[in-house]
Structures are given as structure tokens and as C-alpha cells.
Amino acid sequence: MKFSVAAEREKASALAEEHVTWLDGDDSFGAAYEEFKKRLTGLKNAVRPIIRRIEEYNKRPAALNSTMNKLADYASKVMKLNKTMSWVTDEQK
């Protein structure tokens, strides 16, 4: 997978398996809410870096497009400056 390394996948997988085993066992029936929350938080923390990279990957085309549009707008303004404001010296540009 291009969004994670083997160590990250192994850690998340091991945690998920550990939690499934715990949920299927007798220990989970009498567990307090805090224990469930702690386990869920641990699992979320393990996969958060992977999810973040996926989200960044999905947002990258829009960010690139926005940057290209801003650069084109800037180039257009520079050309306008060169054509319509001849009194502006090269040093001031």
C-alpha cells in the first residue's frame, strides 16, 4: 500500500485483532466505558497517520490546481503591469 509502511499496517492489524479477541472474550462484558474508549482511542491513533496521508493524497489535485491558477493569475498581472504601466521602472517591478 502506498499510504503506509509494513510496520504501521502490522501495528494496526495486531491492535485490531487484539481488540476483537478481547471483545469476543468474557473480559469485555463487565468492562467499563473508559476501557472501551481507551481501546478505541489506541486503534484510532494507530491508523491516524495512514488516514491523514490518504486524505492529503485525495486533496493534492485540488491544491495543485489552485496553485496553478494563482500562478497564472500572477503571470497575467505581471504582463498587464508591463503593458499598461510603462512608467514603472524595471527596479520597481
Image (cartoon, rainbow, N blue to C red):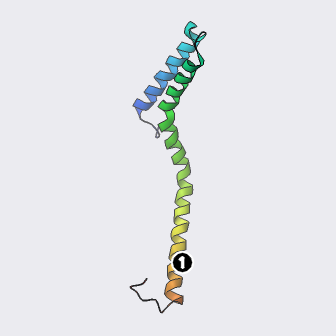
In percent of width and height, residue 59 lies at 55, 51
Instruction: Residue at 48%, 27% (x, y): give it.
Output: 12
Q: Residue 32: which quarter of the image?
A: top right
Question: Residue 85: horizontal and vertical position, in percent?
Answer: 51, 89
Residue 75 lies, with reference to residue 20, above or below; the image says: below
Q: Which residue is mark 1?
A: 76
Compared across the picture, whether 7 is left or right of 75 comes to left
Q: Amino acid type of disc 1?
A: Ser
61 or 22: nearer the viewer: 22
| Nearer to me, 31 or 19 | 31
| Relative side of 18 to 6, left or right | right
The percent coordinates of residue 86 (x first, y second) are: 49, 92
x 41%, y 35%: residue? 5
**Residue 9 or residue 44, whichever sits in front:** 44
- The residue at 52%/63% (across/down) is 67
Q: Nearer the viewer, residue 45 or 8?
A: 45
Please report the residue visible at 52 percent of the width from the left and 23 percent of the height from the top.
38
Circle 1 packing at 10 Å, graded few (<14), some (14-19), many (20+), is few
Q: Is residue 84 positioned above or below 1 on the image?
A: below
Total numbered labels: 1
Where's residue 73, x and y in %? 55, 73
